[in-house]
Image (spheres, rainbow, N blue to C red):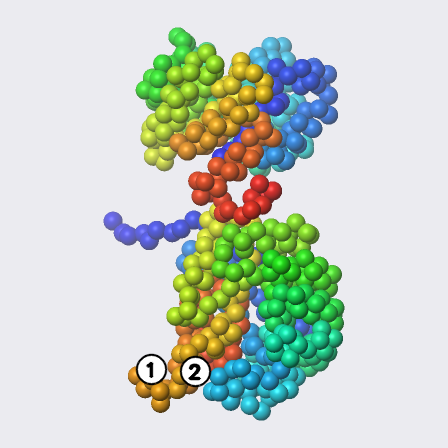
Amino acid sequence: MSFTPPKEVYNGKVYTVTISKGAKAVTFGGENVLPFHSFEGEFVNKPVIAYEIQDIAPSEWPEQLRQVYAAVGDDTVKWAKYVQDELKAEAIALRLQGTHPDSGNRSADDAAKTVKAVLDNIDVPLIILGSNNVEKDAEVLVKVSEVAKDNPCIIGKAQEDNYKTIAAAAMANKHKLIAMSELDINLSKQLNIMLTQMGFDKEKIIIDPMCSALGYGIEYTYTVMERIRLAALMQNDTTMQQPIVGDVGMYVWKIKEVQASEDILPHWGALTPRGIAWEAQTACALTMAGAGLLIMRHPEAVKAVNAFLDEMM
Amino acid sequence: MLIIGEKLSIIAKRVREAMAKRDKGPIQEIAKKQYEHGARMIDANIGPAEGQEDLMEWMVTTIQEVVQAPVCLDTTNYDALEMGLKVHNNEWGRALINSTSNDPERWPIMDLAAKYGCDIIALTVGKGGLPADAEERSAIAAELMARAGEVGIPMENIYLDPLVLQVATTQDQALKVIQTIRMFQDLNDPPMKTVVGLSNISNGCPKQMRPILNAHYLSLLSYEGLSAAIADAEEIVTTVKTIDIFLGKTLYAHSYLEM
């Protein structure tokens, strides 16, 4: 008797999300199976990696990462063009870190000018992120939504305390929206329900269940992502069928493992490859859990993850 | 849990009058409301319908004109059933015949289920009186399954109905029916489907008590694995959604009742 491998039966499907800028577009989501289970159904869209850039010089980033962008880091438009033209970014994630009250407190109008300038100079899709300050993001993201209205983007992140304002702006200007909750699957579902109840198209939401770096609670992120996918696929829960984003770089490039030099901790190995490996490992793990969009910082880490994804697809 | 919306019964005056006048308005209004509250099948109870064989045909088309769901054809009238099955739109699922039993007079209906490939409720009662306990119900179920198998009905098309009785007059039967739900499932692999006429439990009880009795009884039956209930969707929808949360069939969110 021959052996037939058992196959899981799924009832649901993840929405497909496409963002485009002119002729260039990226598509993620769309699977009707668990990540990479193409032997059980459709897993056709390779997860997309967006390069993170900022509206201010990345002075908070570790030295070995800053060096990569040394020539462009103090000019957002140059930085955008660099990741697009030299690093061949499929998509760019512009984080408006400078709008945070503790990081310069740039005005919403200034942020809008930066967004406009970047959009005028790139031809890959753009993700626009606030500074994760609930009050300021509500102000900034409304303004940038308006200036970006001719170029549908992904904007974020909408959270429980500011989603109404941000979602209304995204809806009015035809953007997609990242909905973030803090490592709690039930609150993630609740936020999606509240967004759709205010009229936001459920197929234009991207779920951010909150990321964490390897060694810093990644298992929490992993399990929330995995359970979101199981609810979407096994229970056909339409409030959980949105693609998931992993905001990886931000969480990796602040931990001690990517900052402590080999002089101090020789048994940890060389610092530069260690940081790259840390970001790549974190990102790969999250694609296994269900992330379809990754936001990353180091080109070598992006390369490593892309090689992994090519092998898995 | 499949809710089979029960409000379209000839026993109700408004429905009876609409049936008599072939007035689609009230029928469609009730069917739509049941669907909106989560019923995914609509029960059409036309009684014996002697001399009214075309009534089921009219009911099926009237319901399916406005509701995208299969119909549960509730009558003992063979010809009416067949006329209804002929026009039933299977796009949203198979029709369900309500019902056959171990009474020889109800056996011919099984041929219709085989002929039209639809589902059928098998009520586990015989000609001689009501079943005493879970064991007796299961014995009748086994006989009905064998008979259904002979005429070519797949086991997956059968819903076994243990016959819920009034708690007000036969209290001990309430628990026996709960036990039967588990026992029925063990009669086959994959497990047999089960259905109850839920509101029977509160028949004869004060009106304001009935929703309470129905809801709690449904919780216990659900825990034992009940597949479907013929009930007023509007009345039991919050109970069903809450049960689905506790049984892990739906992911909890504060707004789960609104979904």
Q: Chain of mark 2?
A: A
Q: Position of residue A191 (x, y in %)?
A: 59, 54
Q: Pointer 1 indicates a residue of which chain?
A: A
Rendered residue at 56%/61% (across/down): A180
Asked if residue B223 lies left or right of residue B209, the reply is left
Q: Extreme left residue here?
A: A1
Mark 1: secondary structure: helix
Is A218 displayed left or right of A241 in the figure? Answer: left
Q: Residue at x 53, y 21 (%)?
A: B199
- Residue B104, image quadrant: top left
Q: Residue at x 63, y 70 (%)?
A: A130
**Residue A114 sits in which quadrant?**
bottom right
The residue beneath circle 1 is A268
Q: Which residue is mark 2?
A: A259
Residue drawn at 55 percent across, 25 percent down = B211
| Mark 1 vs mark 2, CA separation in Å | 11 Å
**Residue B71 visible in the current orientation:** no
